[in-house]
Image (tube, grey):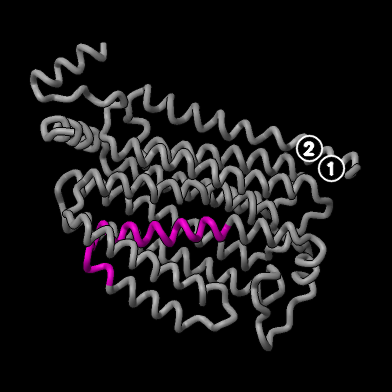
């Protein structure tokens, strides 16, 4: 069969059609997502393992945290809707609508990261922290959270590891969509965001150093756009959409497993 | 890939999308939000953990299925693409379950 295909290609200049009926960029992204799902799978299984093997697993999330996480979930789900509408606009060749839907998706993703960052900062200030995070000056740790961090260190370790990895993916997703939507124009915006994130966060916050990720992505995006400047077509938007939906999909497992299964219920 | 093949593939993608109305995306989004609301309601029901975990993971799988099928367009891919990607993912993730008996051993038998 391969001989026939090769001869056919030589004779007419037409390659054998894709085995999977789609273009290679999309197959490449699916392969990346499959490998990435194993990364998140390992983290989720590690969290579950810790929970099963640890008696008295803490349930520290009060209604405020659950409300915040529910709002974050709503933002991510809405971002998936705007993303799929961006792909649809791209396929129909409506560049203006495509750009606006992509920007809406980025806005929802940014809202998710900000809400998540606030949640992290609140938990760290109250004592649910990791040894690597600096202490928050002038803030008394709540006995409840401090106790959790000391007696069940697996909880903050797996919680920050899992949600931190997801937050990293969402941040990179926002940058990815920004490059697809605005191309070179996004680089100065990204540098501005880096400066704001770096200067607006206090020195003891993990986000103060985490903000440098934005600088790194600006450098990488600048190199990519300089080496291969192009107008992104509908296939590029669809491939970016696959990544974004994957990030949303992973959160559908993190939210119930980490937050809802650790809800503190207070009966009056 | 040459221009003719690229063009044919793009046409196929465009054709797929033309068959989707916008409405179905809004329906899926609404269903995902409703299921999330139900999950949050369950979170406050003080159920037995194993039962609650089973329901929550069942709903999460359903939500993941909707996202993959409609938002990621897997429903409209060739069946060999669907089977190869989804079955390999399920097998790899299922293999990770091999660690769970050890977690039970620790909690029931203690660390020897």
Q: Which chain does tag 2 point to?
A: B
At a point 39% along the width and 51% down the height, the residue shown is: A244
Spot occupied by residue A143 in the image (x, y as percentages of width and height): 79, 74
Q: Nearer the viewer, residue B42 or A268?
A: B42
Count of numbered circles in the view: 2
At a point 40% along the width and 35% down the height, the residue shown is: B69
What residue is disc 1 on? Answer: B106
Q: Nearer the viewer, residue B60 or A217?
A: A217
Residue A188, compared with residue A113, is above or below; it is below
Mark sitting on residue A255: none
The residue sitting at the left extreme is A12
Spot occupied by residue A81 in the image (x, y as percentages of width and height): 36, 50
Q: Residue A86 magenta-drawn? A: no
Instruction: Say left or right for B47 vs A114.
Output: right
Are circles 2 and 1 on residues that touch, CB within 8 Å? yes
What residue is disc 2 on? Answer: B102
Graded by Cα atoms within 10 Å as few (under 14), some (14 to 19) or many (20 or more), the crowding at tag 2 reads some
Q: CA distance from mark 2 to mark 1?
A: 6 Å
At a point 68% along the width and 79% down the height, the residue shown is: A135
Q: Nearer the viewer, residue A52 or B22?
A: A52
Q: Residue A184 magenta-drawn? A: yes
Disc 2 on helix, strand or loop?
A: helix
Q: Which chain does tag 1 point to?
A: B
At a point 73% along the width and 83% down the height, the residue shown is: A140
The span picked out in magenta is A163-187
Where's the N terminus of chain B, which quadrant? top left
């Amino acid at each position: 069969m391969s001989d026939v295909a090769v001869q056919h290609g030589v004779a007419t200049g037409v390659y054998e059609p894709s085995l999977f009926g789609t273009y290679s960029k999309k197959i490449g992204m699916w392969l990346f997502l499959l490998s990435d799902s194993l990364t998140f799978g390992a983290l989720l299984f590690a969290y579950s393992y810790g929970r099963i093997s640890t008696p008295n697993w803490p349930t520290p999330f009060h209604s405020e945290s659950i409300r915040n996480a529910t709002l974050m979930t709503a933002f991510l789900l809405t971002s998936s809707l705007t993303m799929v509408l961006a792909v649809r606009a791209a396929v129909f060749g409506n560049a203006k609508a495509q750009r606006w839907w992509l920007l809406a998706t980025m806005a929802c993703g940014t809202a998710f990261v900000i809400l998540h960052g606030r949640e992290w900062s609140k938990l760290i200030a109250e004592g649910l922290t990791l040894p690597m995070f600096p202490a928050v000056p002038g803030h008394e740790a709540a006995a409840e959270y401090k106790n959790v961090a000391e007696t069940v260190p697996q909880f903050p370790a797996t919680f920050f590891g899992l949600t931190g990895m997801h937050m990293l993916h969402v941040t990179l997703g926002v940058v990815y969509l920004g490059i697809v939507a605005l191309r070179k124009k996004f680089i100065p915006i990204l540098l501005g965001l880096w400066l704001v994130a770096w200067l607006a966060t206090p020195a003891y916050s993990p986000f103060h150093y985490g903000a440098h990720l934005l600088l790194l992505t600006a450098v990488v995006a600048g190199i990519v756009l300089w080496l291969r400047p192009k107008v992104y077509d509908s296939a590029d938007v669809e491939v970016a959409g696959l990544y974004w939906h994957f990030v949303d999909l992973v959160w559908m497992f993190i939210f119930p497993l980490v937050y809802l299964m650790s809800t503190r219920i207070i009966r009056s | 890939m040459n221009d003719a093949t690229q063009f044919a593939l793009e046409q196929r993608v465009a054709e797929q999308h033309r068959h989707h109305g916008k409405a179905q995306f809004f329906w899926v989004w609404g269903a995902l939000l409703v299921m999330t609301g139900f999950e949050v309601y369950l979170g406050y029901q003080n159920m037995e953990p194993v039962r609650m975990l089973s329901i929550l993971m069942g709903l999460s799988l359903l939500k993941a299925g909707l996202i993959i099928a409609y938002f990621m367009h897997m429903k409209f891919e060739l069946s060999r693409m669907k089977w190869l990607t989804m079955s390999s993912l399920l097998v790899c993730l299922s293999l990770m379950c091999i660690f769970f008996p050890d977690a039970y051993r620790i909690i029931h038998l203690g660390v020897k």
